[in-house]
Image: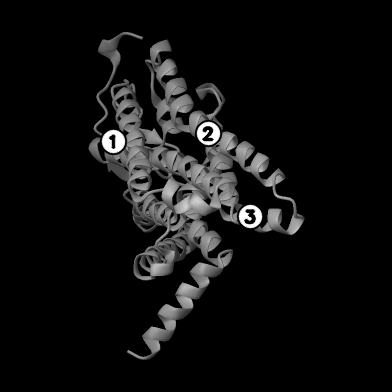
Amino acid sequence: MDEKNYTTVKEFILLGFTTDPCLQRVLFYIFLIIYISSLLGNITLISLICVDSWLHTPMYFFIGNLSYLDLWYASVYAPQILMTRISDDKRISFAGCLAQFFFSAGLAYSECYLLAAMAYDRYVAISNPLLYSQAMSPNLCVSLAAASYFSGFVNSTIITSETFTLSFCGNNVIDDFFCDLPPLVKLACDMKESYQAVLYFILASNIITPAVLILASYFFIIAALLKIRFTQGRLKAFSTCGSHLTAVTLYYGSILFIYSRPSMSYALERDKVVSVFYTVVIPLLNPLIYSLRNKDVKDALRKMLDRAKFL
């Protein structure tokens, strides 16, 4: 198609889930409850980790960072979703769409790397428990977390610049509830092989590579567990990985379902449901996973509530 036929897109229209006013109102309250619960859960978990000295360990340092990411991750999407549910104005500016895309991608990629760092932390804790605190020094923990954020946002800069320099042929209707990669790719009319190469690079560097690192860590964890003579000891050691494994399975399951397929095979109606899960529901589930399954967190919460009674 000739470039002179392209129309500059200055804003996008977010269709969301439905045009039924009654159903939109129901969805508004559902998303509002989920968002508020997500904020409260992650803020509470971060506060517990900061306040309770028993939680000042490498494992909880990473859990706190995961909650911090989830706190902002949910906030990138939820306000826009809530606004489009109660307003007839479904527009989002080109700059607003770009900003939402950039921060959502940066936070998502950072979480992939952080989950890989957490897997390594679990390997060190199980393979060498006596020297765990020394091996996972504060400097190393901070470096791993910083590298996760840096890698995530560097790659987000690459994919954002490549995506928003595409031509959208004047079609500005996004069949989704936020500015995500699959619906934007559907609108593009000048898809080139170079852009497909960038997509595969982003997939490999931000999803596949951390996934391989996680699998490698658990391979060595299993090898370390096999050296433990007693079954009860093995189960106790592996139980410390349960929350992390649950978080990885939920997050990577939904991410890979959407982004590991060629762009032409996207099914937006089906993918919207999965997108809701990893953008809105998972930030709510993670603090529950790491609190309900964790005795130390529950003890810290109990102490915080007891102190609050005397205030």
Which residue sits at x=59%, y=64%? 293
The reply to whether residue 17 is visible in this rendering is no
Residue kind at label 3, given as amino acid type: Ala
Q: Which mark is residue 36?
A: none
Sequence-earlier tag: 2 or 1: 1
The CA span between labels 2 and 3 is 20 Å
- Residue 230, how many percent across, how many down? 75, 55
The CA span between labels 1 and 3 is 44 Å
Which residue sits at x=40%, y=55%? 61
Classify residue 160 as left or right of residue 200.
left
Residue kind at label 2, given as amino acid type: Leu
Q: Mark 3 = which residue?
A: 237
Camera-side residue of 250 and 37:
250
Q: Is mark 3 on a helix, strand or loop?
A: helix
Camera-side residue of 150 and 134:
134
Which residue sits at x=59%, y=41%? 253
